[in-house]
Amino acid sequence: MKHLAILALIAATAASHLFAAGEITLRTCEGCVKSDFDSLGLDIDWNVEWPETIDGVGEKVLTAIHRRICLDVFTEPFYDRDSKKPPMHYDRPDQAQRYLVYRALFKIREQADRYLDYHAKLKICLATSGYLGYTIIGCHSEGGNGCHDYSISRVFSLNTGKLISEHDLFDPENYDPLNRHIVAKAVKEKNTSTMPEEVSAYRDVMSRGLFDDGNFMIEPGGIRWHIPPYSVFCGAAGVVDTLVPWDDLKPFFRDPGYCDALKNIAATARTVIRE
């Protein structure tokens, strides 16, 4: 019954806002910290499309999205994993930026070679009547061993502010065949001729972790998954993304009706105003 309710909500959202998706106003939040002196090396920058206002969306939902953006861009990358305290939550980027700079300087004091490299670019990729999605592309390295590419995608319900996960859309019993389908498509599309021999060594041991974090984006043509390094390919391949068309996905949904409902949602774009 729960998932029938989700399907009804998806369909109702798409239908009710098909001709009145509204506007979303984005502001650019960017900054950098750089130093290259003797053994101290800092190269940090960020560029964030910050959703300032979204027509028809209440403050509680918008705050939930703001907190997740701050967590993904500013807090979690430098959070002390050994700490018993949960990561700090910030509603606005000014305080979150201060936390990032403070933690970066703290970390670099602990390192013998004293080098830290961090870059993050957040772009709003999905802005529809009922959903908002963003993708962060970046790299992160501590200690001067080269940057490690990463990509984070999030899709939020604008009715509740909650993240949408694969579990909301797909039957867990279909995870394994869906996993194989995504991996096979990514391997076929990725040119591995210039990569080390071990570049594909991870594809056979890839776990269901692909579906743990909702690292996907809904697009008009289907759903795009961002596959992290060391999961399908080695680190040299970087982040690999692949778009799985709606027709290919239809057998994997909890309900076949999800497919058409999501296609309609992806087609109800808001007017984006960038300030």
Image (cartoon, helix red, strand yellow):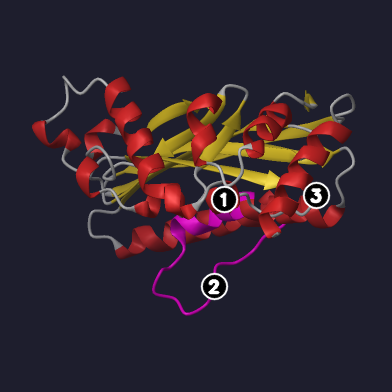
User: Is residue 138 depicted above or below 63 in this figure?
Assistant: above
Residue 159's tag is: 3
Residue 86's tag is: 2
Q: Secondary structure at mark 2?
A: loop
Q: Secondary structure at mark 3?
A: loop
Magenta-drawn stretch contains 85: yes
Residue at 69 percent across and 55 percent down: it is 162
Q: Which callout, 2 or 1, points at the residue further toward the start of the chain?
A: 2
Depth check, front residue: 144 or 168? 168
Depth check, front residue: 242 or 235? 242
Q: Secondary structure at mark 1?
A: loop
The type of residue carrying mark 3 is Asn
Depth check, front residue: 238 or 96? 238
Answer with left or right where residue 241 lies relative to residue 54. left
Q: CA distance from mark 3 to mark 1?
A: 15 Å
Answer with left or right where residue 165 lies relative to residue 178. right
The type of residue carrying mark 2 is Pro
Magenta residues (range):
69-91
Q: Residues within 10 Å of mark 3 (few under 14, many from 20)?
A: some
Residue at 87 percent across and 51 percent down: it is 58
Q: Which residue is mark 1?
A: 165
Q: Quadrant of residue 242?
A: top left
